[in-house]
Image: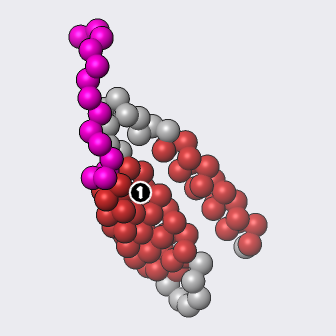
Amino acid sequence: MKKSLLLKTTILTLSLFLLEGCTGTELLPNDATQTGASTGAITGAVLGYNTKGHHKGTRAAIGSVLGAVTGGLIGQAVDNNNPQPTQTGGWE
């Protein structure tokens, strides 16, 4: 049981790192909100699942939602503090 949980957590974490690379700056120059929300969702789900008690799936879902909201809000604050990129010319 412990090995199965460790394997799932490892696969989920590696998937998160691979998916984070897909949020490039080409389309959205301010992507800290995206990154914060996805990282918060994964972290919240893992923490919710590993807390004591019954209904692990329900706690994982609640943790995921709370983590996504919290991470998204923190990422939005980071985006608001960073200056907007300016166009310097080049090929158009």
For the C terminus, the image quarter is top left
Say which of 28 and 53 sits in front: 28
Left or right of 37 on screen, residue 4? right
Tell me which residue sits at (31%, 59%) in the image. 77
Whether residue 61 is visible to the viewer of this picture, yes or no, is: no
| Residue range (magenta) | 79-92
Query: Is 27 part of what is drawn in magenta?
Result: no
Left or right of 75 on screen, residue 7? right
In the rendered image of this protein, does residue 24 appear above or below residue 36? above
| Residue 23 in picture, x, y percent from top left | 41, 39
Q: Which amino acid does label 1 sit on?
A: Gly
The image quadrant of residue 41 is: bottom left
Tell me which residue sits at (30%, 11%) in the image. 90
The local crowd at label 1, few if under 14, some if 14 to 19, many if 20 or more residues have their Cα within 10 Å, is many
For the N terminus, the image quarter is bottom right
Left or right of 89 on screen, residue 78? right
Residue under numbered circle 1:
36
| Residue 54 in picture, x, y percent from top left | 53, 89
Query: Is 83 part of what is drawn in magenta?
Result: yes
| Residue 66 in picture, x, y percent from top left | 38, 73
